[in-house]
Image (cartoon, grey):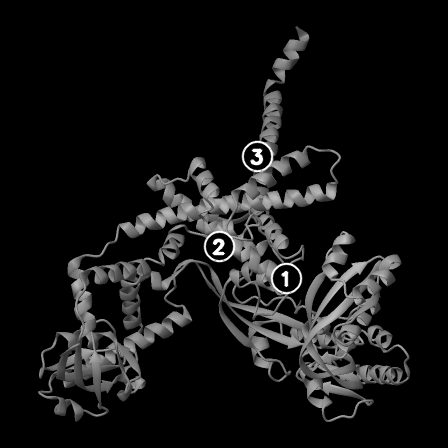
Amino acid sequence: MATLQKIRSKGTTLIIILGLALFAFIAEELVRALSSSRNASRQVIGEIYGESVTYQEFNDLVDEYENAWKLGNGGQNLTEAQSIQLRDQVWSELLRTRVIEHEAEALGLTVTDAELQNIINTGSNQLLRQTPFVNQQTGMFDVNMLKQFLTNYEEIQNNPEYPEAQKEMLVQYYKYWKLVEKQVRHDVLAQKYQTLLSSCLISNPVSAKAAFEARNNETKVLLASVPYTSIKDSEVEPTEEELKAKYEELTKQMPDMFDMQDEARDIKYILVPVTASDADRQALTAEMNEYKAALDSADNIANVVRESRSSVSYSGLPVSKKSLPSDIAAQLDSINPGATFGPSVNAATNTMSVIKYIAKVQQADSTEVTYIDVIADKADSVLAVLNSGEHIDSVAKRLDTQSQTQWITSAIIDSQSWPESLKSFFQGIFQSPAGAFKSYELPGGVRIAKVNERRNVIDKYDVAIIRRNIDFSDDTHNTIWNKFSSFLAANPTQADIEANALKAGYQVQTAQYVSSADHYIANVPSTTDALRWVYKSKVGDVSELFEAGEAHDQFLVVMLTAIHKRGLRDFNDETLRQYLTQEVLKDKKAAQLLPKVEGAKSLAEVAKISGALQDTISHITFAAPVFVASTASSEPILSGAASAAAKGQFVTGLKGEAAVYAFQVLEKNKLEGKYDEKQELAQQSSTILRGIGGFMQNLVRKAKVVDDRYKFYQ
């Protein structure tokens, strides 16, 4: 009882303690939930119709496409530019797929598994012809090849004795096929949607007849124009109220024109190139002079070229002039063979070169050769049999091998530096007489070859080239960095930088509407970090100093000057205000000119107005806008007015894009041509299809797409 009484006496305290403990527990769970939510949001790479696209989801799709690309390019890795292009392609494909699926779901459109299988069985989709499962004789997709592959895939994957490397290769091809299958399904769904859409818009005899008349009825006019340029801009400067009124008018009439689908930024920036100093050039010149001396005395010229880290390889074989650097090729015919010259500088390529011109020869540009590869022990006997007259195919059959016939061209010889074994083979086939077999030692055997035919004798050059880029040193890099850093430290604000940059030798440049989809700042590679900074900073901020360029050969500082949000462009947007100003100027000038033109009783009176111009324009039809040479403007209003006017009629007071117009109709003509309703209806249908060709862009606008890929990729 005493214990119970003690608990009761401390009841309030215990309740407070329990309450605090319970609150702590709830708070801890809330923090965990918020933390989990934040982590999840950090993995969102974009949105389509308000639904998140995660980094993992998108990256998995990128991996599928990259696997397909590598299979088609011999396993070669993608460059930075190719990776960016691939990710853009995948994003576009993802957008297209999501948008079509969203619309198709609302309409009840689907592609069933049975339908997809039928398409695969018949090979009717063009995408299937881009797979490895194509019959080489027919050029058509072969479903039996696919079925055989899938059967083999299942058997091999379940076979523990099969080599893992080959299993992995089959896995890559299987993933590639599943991607193609997915693409076919999406492609067919898109075709269904487009077919349904186009079927909703059909031609009719009335519009077909009208279109025919619009093309075939021509008008010739004598035109008088009073250009807006005849009034100075300063005489009709727009007020703020007029600009706002024009903004309201145009955003209601043409909202899409002023709608921004993605956020954008205006920036100013300084880009400083890092180039070699005089000391760097002198050091490279001294090094190149050492290589020049080595070329003059070397027994193995190829070794000297290789050790020099030259950007131009040396095969030891005469090559065609077109395979050589153009500046060096241009010099060779004016120099005697045997000379070594340089170092010479090519400012256009920023390179320094030393050249040893060994010899000039005349050789065939291409040689046809037939050959057979045999083991060394049998080479002499096979050579004797072939030179005795037995056909190479019968010899190859006895040896259980095959002969080869191939054209060896200068392009093949020039394409790379060949090993010594192949070098002797190439020398032999370009120098040996035709008709006789000769043997050439190769790694692992002997090649017995005969020259069949040679074509197109050209000049070839045996020339060793040591070419190096004139690169900057670390000292030069650091010196330019320190100088630029000091300038930025002394000028921390945008105003300071703009006021003092030119005096310090730097140029401030401007870029408007920089999008995250641009990938780079000012088209300079390796500026993704700078782009990220732009999208997380405030107007007025100055960035840190970035290294840029593939070779870290530029320094970049960025200043954020404006942020453009999604949706209608803001009235104060500088570029938009310039456009609004021009539109208001046009309206105000037209308001002054129209009464003068409308008051004229004849074209002769219009011609007397200050600044008026005259043109004779023929072949005007309702089907196309009129181009007025004197105002250098396309004027749709003239097409309609001239087509509607009668011969001899005077029409005045037309407000165009570049002037106010009046005209006198001189002639009305009808072109020869018979109306073919069937043909006209088909043409109208084709025009309608072209007109709806941009439907995808409109659907993407509705999808409220958010693209934040720049946050995740370098």
3D distance between C-alphas at marks 3 and 1: 42 Å
Give the residue drawn at x 29%, y 66%: 250
Q: Which mark is residue 30?
A: 3
- Depth check, mark 3 against mark 1: the one in front is 1
Nearest to N terminus: mark 2 or mark 3: 3
* Position of 443 relative to 559 (above/below): above
Q: Residue tagged by mark 1?
A: 80
Q: Which mark is residue 92?
A: 2
Q: Nearer the viewer, residue 136 or 334?
A: 136
Tally the marks.
Answer: 3
Amino acid of disc 3 = Leu
Nearest to N terminus: mark 2 or mark 1: 1
- Depth check, mark 2 against mark 3: the one in front is 2
Dot 3, crowdedness within 10 Å: few (<14), some or many (≥20)? Answer: few
3D distance between C-alphas at marks 2 and 3: 38 Å
Q: Is residue 606 left or right of residue 53?
A: left
Amino acid of disc 2 = Ser
Dot 2, crowdedness within 10 Å: few (<14), some or many (≥20)? Answer: few
Q: Secondary structure at mark 3?
A: helix
Q: Is residue 43 visible?
A: no
Give the residue drawn at x 35%, y 41%: 106
Quarter holding the N terminus is top right
Amino acid of disc 1 = Glu
Residue 294 at x, y = what percent?
89, 82
Residue 215 at x, y = what percent?
21, 72
Residue 714: image quadrant is bottom right
